Amino acid sequence: MRLCLFDDDRLGLVRRDPVAGDLVHDASAALEALPARRYPFPRHDLLVAALPALRAPILAAADAQPGRPLASVRLRPPVANPGKIVAAPVNYRKHLEEAEADPATFHAAHVRKIEETGLFLKATSSLAGASDTLRVNQPDRRTDHEVELAAIIGTPCKDATRENALGHVAAYAIGLDITIRGPEERSLRKSPDTYTVLGPWMVTADEIGDPAALDLLLEVNGEVRQRANTRDLLLDIPALIVFASRFYTLEPGDILLTGTPEGVGPIRPGDTMHAAIEGIGAMTLRVA
């Protein structure tokens, strides 16, 4: 299933019509099956946690609604309440090599192998959707694009093994990890508002045959900047889940950004970014 949140946080099922293209069917009626919660609220995302049980209600609700053209809705982040956003630095070999070769841009303190650097966390307030405008936070400093495959955790996970790691993934999406260059810690430079774009929807894991063989593409103003395949990850998705879950419990709705390939470059107000990942889709964002 391709699931989106749209407009005022309506739940949508995205289906491809051979004539009309992508259509969004309102499946919000299925949300009535979610448990009512009172304060203190859980740290995880209720919808993502309930996806297996909601599959039939979502399909039934979508069948009862006409499809709306994708261009007529505002796509919000497909995960409304992630407990945390976990990100992998320099996780493609060629990106590590380009960073090592350009110390003027990539601060030497941050250019190490991922096993040495470890993972980092981004503020959940940085989350944006495919229809949002990316707003440059520090216009006097270089701000870069980074396209990544995002894995969305579906079940609680602590001390995962390589054998069971992928079983904890509910869905995948395109992630944009926007970065201010400089000496500060990554979590600060990558956490301004709109600096974590997730979208255009989430594709349930059963729809993705092999997450280790997906083509990625990012263009800025029509120019190809990044083109790679997830087979080139230094630590693949199972290894990242094992790594992360050694330190903290991964919970439903947590977002794992798996790293960006070579070709990162600056973006400026007025630019248009187009990102695509095989098996998931594509999204276009404006920079302001």
Image (spheres, rainbow, N blue to C red):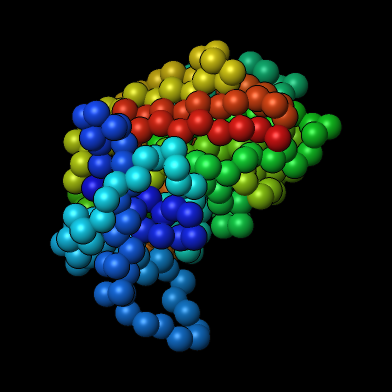
Determine which quarter of the picture holds residue 125. bottom right
Q: Nearer the viewer, residue 160 or 116?
A: 160
Above/below status of 282 relative to 57: above
Above/below status of 182 relative to 193: above
Picture residue at 48% right of the left edge, 54% below the top: 7
Q: Position of residue 42 (x, y in %)?
A: 44, 76
In the picture, the quarter occupied by the C terminus is top right
Q: Tell me if residue 18 can be seen.
A: yes
- Marker count (numbered): 0
Q: Position of residue 99 (x, y in %)?
A: 61, 23
Q: Tell me if residue 99 can be seen.
A: no
Position of 128 with respect to 232 (left or right) is right
Picture residue at 49% right of the left edge, 60% below the top: 8
Q: Nearer the viewer, residue 75 or 104?
A: 75
Position of 62 with respect to 235 (left or right) is left
Position of 138 with respect to 56 (left or right) is right
Picture residue at 64% right of the left edge, 29% below the top: 144
Q: Nearer the viewer, residue 113 or 57?
A: 57
Picture residue at 17% right of the left edge, 60% below the top: 60
Q: Position of residue 130 (x, y in %)?
A: 50, 41
Q: Position of residue 113 (x, y in %)?
A: 52, 33
Which residue is the extreme one toward the front? 66
